[in-house]
Amino acid sequence: MKSAKLLVCNWKAIVTKTSDAKKIVTYISKLSSGVKKNIVVCPPAPFIGLVTLGKLSAGSQTVSNEHAGSTTGKIAAELLNDLKVNYCIVGHSEERARGVLNKTVNEQIQRLLEQKITPIVCLGEVERDMQGEYLKDVSVMINETFANLTIKQIETCIIAYEPVWAIGAKAKRPATLHEAEEAILFIKKNLAHKNKEKVPTVKFLYGGSIDETNASEFYHSPIIDGLLIGRASTSVDAFKSIVKNL
Ligand code: PGA
């Protein structure tokens, strides 16, 4: 792993033992500083302290769309800021499946930007048809998710292209590199429309069934700036084989 691309580890709710969390943090902490600084660990919230204690870059898996206050069960962006969390995943399809709407994701982005935390905004179609209709869904997602945000604010975000059919235990398969690049170029073109046809300088990740067999291909694409890794980031062995092969 030579270049400075990002590896974002989404532990979801898979890592549930402190001892397992410590093992992964210890492994990453021992990597060379050049490699380590490009890894972001997004653990379940109670493990955030463990990640920052290991001097790793921490990300949250979610954030409240509201300001700090009487919202039981939510995590306020103000708290993430105090915990020195640098990144936060928003719009993940597993959250959207629980009813999180584009409008809420838009508000979450605003709360994070107020606290100088980088939003990692997940976008992607549920199904991919042969006629390209799926691009319409992606287009609506972009418009609603980034509504009323300035280009400067959008440029502060990282966008993760995550086709829903490629994510998690129910994934059909990973996207092909061609499918991922095509969708990312489409998102770039869409954002350029908001910016007098100039493509904003946004970083793009690919996520969905990344493992040691396909990580390198996505990682070295000239238009992909990093990977969002779910299941394969939740054990030392699986994550180690990814890092080794980059
Ligand atoms: P997966 O998840 O790597 O387990 O498919 C990706 C993600 O949730 O971002």
Image: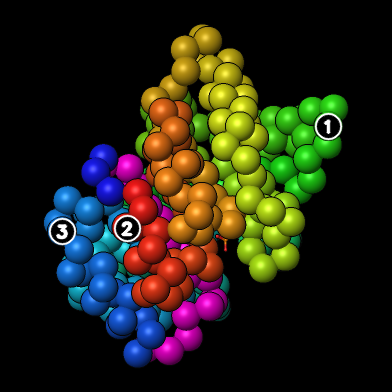
Q: In which quarter of the image is ligand 1?
A: bottom right
The chief SS type of the magenta part is: loop
Identify the residue shown where x is 69% and y is 35%: 138
Q: Which amino acid does label 1 sit on?
A: Met
- Could you classify mark 1 by the number of other residues whose Cα lies within 10 Å: few (under 14), some (14-19), or many (20 or more)? few
For label 1, the residue is 130
Q: Earlier in the sequence, mark 3 or mark 2?
A: 3
Locate residue 218, reporting x and y percent.
48, 41
Q: What residue type is labelled 3?
A: Ser
Q: What residue type is labelled 2?
A: Lys
For label 2, the residue is 244
Q: Which mark is residue 32?
A: 3
Q: Which of marks 1 and 3 is nearer the N terminus?
A: 3
Is residue 198 something that shows in the picture?
yes
- Could you classify mark 3 by the number of other residues whose Cα lies within 10 Å: few (under 14), some (14-19), or many (20 or more)? few
Locate residue 228, reporting x and y percent.
47, 53
- Could you classify mark 2 by the number of other residues whose Cα lies within 10 Å: few (under 14), some (14-19), or many (20 or more)? few
Tell me, yes or no, whether the two marked residues, 1 and 2, touch with CB atoms within 8 Å.
no
In the rendered view, would you say 114 is above or below 155? below
Specify the quadrant of the image occupied by residue 219. Answer: top left
Q: Which of marks 1 and 2 is nearer the N terminus?
A: 1
| The residue positioned farthest toward the top in the image shown | 196
Q: Residue 191 carries which label?
A: none
Numbered disc 3: secondary structure: loop
Identify the residue shown where x is 17% and y is 51%: 34
Identify the residue shown where x is 62% and y is 40%: 176
Residue 9 highlighted magenta (yes or no): yes
| The residue positioned farthest toward the left in the image shown | 33
Tell me, yes or no, whether the two marked residues, 3 and 2, touch with CB atoms within 8 Å.
no
Specify the quadrant of the image occupied by residue 244. Answer: bottom left
Magenta region: 4-18
